[in-house]
């Protein structure tokens, strides 16, 4: 009889605790403040309000390009997204580069360049497929760090040999791991997937990884990284924007064609930018061929092409890793409106913005639109 009473009391106590727990969970959910969300559904609803004929009077803080208010309403709820995109000859044409606000190009190893696209305003109006996505390199982390304390950084693995080229170790040291670091190794499908037939031919596995801007931004939102981080800090609190102005097309350009080689003997990676008076942009060629974006079959173009002469060292190990001296000062050439400006660059620390100055020491004003920054060694010959 005593045992029966004990069991009855224990059972009633258990039911009580379960009821209390359920009530707490339900009411906590009901009364907690609504969290800002950037779900695919919410983005789609906002995008439905975009009117292509609406005034484009909202300046992008990254490229200076003008967009509609509806597009700004989308990007202001997000933070910049950096994506590593490869440039192996077998990976061309890539997807998504034409939608980037800024693109950095530098040698990864073996004379083969790699891109880091900065996606923010240019992907507000649509979801963009991007790839092939490749691995992280330490110097790209330095440039990514210019876009806030926790810039979204998407990649597939990375250099991890102990030493100065250890990109994955640095990601951990910076406090990015499993937060703003969007490494494919830690998430996989469906955020990332492989497409072996994207180019209509079979390619090696390393050239097959893709994602989309919306999928990556959705992961960031789930981690509490919207325009503000989990501590309520705006991404642009310490961000330094460049200066921008409207462009003016030139009918008699003094710099109609820019050409250079990243690595002697690697003609497939030679770069040329051809000035187009009609659009006041430079059209890109890679390996003497028009460089296209597979997403829209458009030739890649830029309103500004910056040649940043950055000391290059390497290979520094048996894995052929390279190092750029990203912090310091150096020479630069800035091409816009069909002309060239002799310039210099400076970057005080990993998180400081790279600033470009003309010969008089005045900060360069960029033409509104895409900006491509070509990181080349000071010994590189550039013709124009």
Image (cartoon, rainbow, N blue to C red):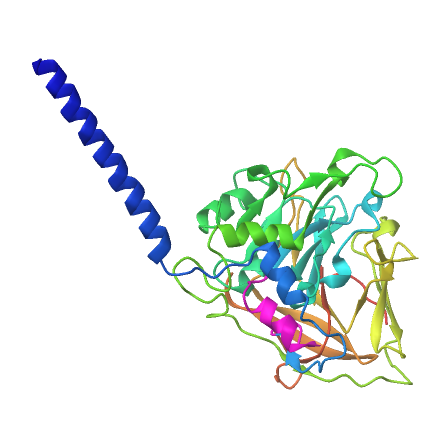
Q: Is residue 112 magenta?
A: no
Write down the region rendered in magenta: 61-80
* Residue 112 in sight here: yes
Q: Is residue 68 magenta?
A: yes
Residue 250 in which image quadrant: bottom right
Which sits in the foreground, 224 or 289?
Answer: 224
Which sits in the foreground, 132 or 296?
Answer: 296
Q: Looking at this rendering, what residue extends furthest in the left direction?
A: 2
Q: Position of residue 109 (x, y in %)?
A: 71, 45
Residue 65 is left or right of residue 187, and the answer is right
Which sits in the foreground, 258 or 291?
Answer: 291
* Residue 158 in sight here: no
Q: Which residue is found at the position 28% from the left and 40% from the top?
A: 21
Residue 313 is left or right of residue 260, and the answer is left
Which sits in the foreground, 61 or 220?
Answer: 220
Residue 78 in which image quadrant: bottom right
């Amino acid at each position: 009889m005593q045992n029966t009473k004990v069991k009855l009391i224990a059972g009633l106590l258990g039911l009580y605790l379960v009821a209390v727990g359920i009530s707490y969970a339900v009411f906590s959910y009901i009364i907690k403040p609504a969290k800002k969300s950037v779900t695919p559904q919410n983005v789609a609803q906002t995008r439905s309000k975009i009117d292509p004929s609406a005034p484009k009077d909202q300046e992008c803080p990254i490229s200076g390009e003008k967009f509609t208010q509806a597009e700004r309403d989308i990007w202001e709820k997000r933070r910049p997204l950096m994506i590593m995109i490869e440039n192996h000859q077998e990976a061309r044409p890539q997807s998504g580069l034409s939608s980037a606000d800024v693109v950095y190009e530098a040698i990864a190893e073996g004379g083969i360049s790699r891109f880091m696209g900065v996606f923010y305003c240019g992907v507000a109006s649509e979801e963009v497929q991007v790839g092939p996505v490749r691995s992280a390199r330490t110097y790209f982390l330095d440039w990514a760090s210019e876009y806030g304390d926790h810039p979204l950084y998407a990649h597939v693995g990375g250099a991890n040999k102990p030493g100065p080229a250890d990109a994955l170790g640095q990601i951990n040291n910076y406090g990015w791991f499993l937060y703003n670091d969007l490494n494919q190794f830690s998430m996989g499908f469906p955020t990332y997937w492989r497409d072996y037939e994207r180019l209509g031919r079979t390619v090696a596995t390393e050239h097959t990884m893709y994602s989309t801007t919306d999928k990556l931004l959705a992961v960031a939102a789930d981690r509490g990284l919207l325009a503000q981080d989990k501590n309520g800090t705006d991404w642009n609190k310490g961000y330094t924007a460049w200066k921008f102005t409207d462009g003016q097309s030139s009918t008699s350009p003094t710099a109609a064609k820019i050409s250079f080689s990243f690595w002697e003997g690697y003609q497939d990676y030679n770069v040329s930018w051809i000035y187009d008076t009609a659009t006041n942009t430079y059209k890109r060629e890679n390996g003497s061929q028009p460089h296209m974006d597979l997403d829209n079959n458009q030739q890649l173009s830029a309103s500004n092409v910056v040649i940043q002469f950055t000391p290059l060292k390497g290979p520094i190990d048996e894995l052929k890793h390279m190092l750029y001296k990203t912090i310091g000062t150096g020479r630069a050439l800035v091409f816009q409106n069909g002309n060239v400006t002799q310039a210099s660059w400076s970057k005080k620390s990993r998180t400081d913005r790279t600033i470009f100055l003309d010969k008089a020491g005045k900060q360069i004003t960029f033409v509104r639109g895409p900006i491509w920054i070509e990181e080349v060694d000071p010994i590189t010959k550039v013709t124009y």
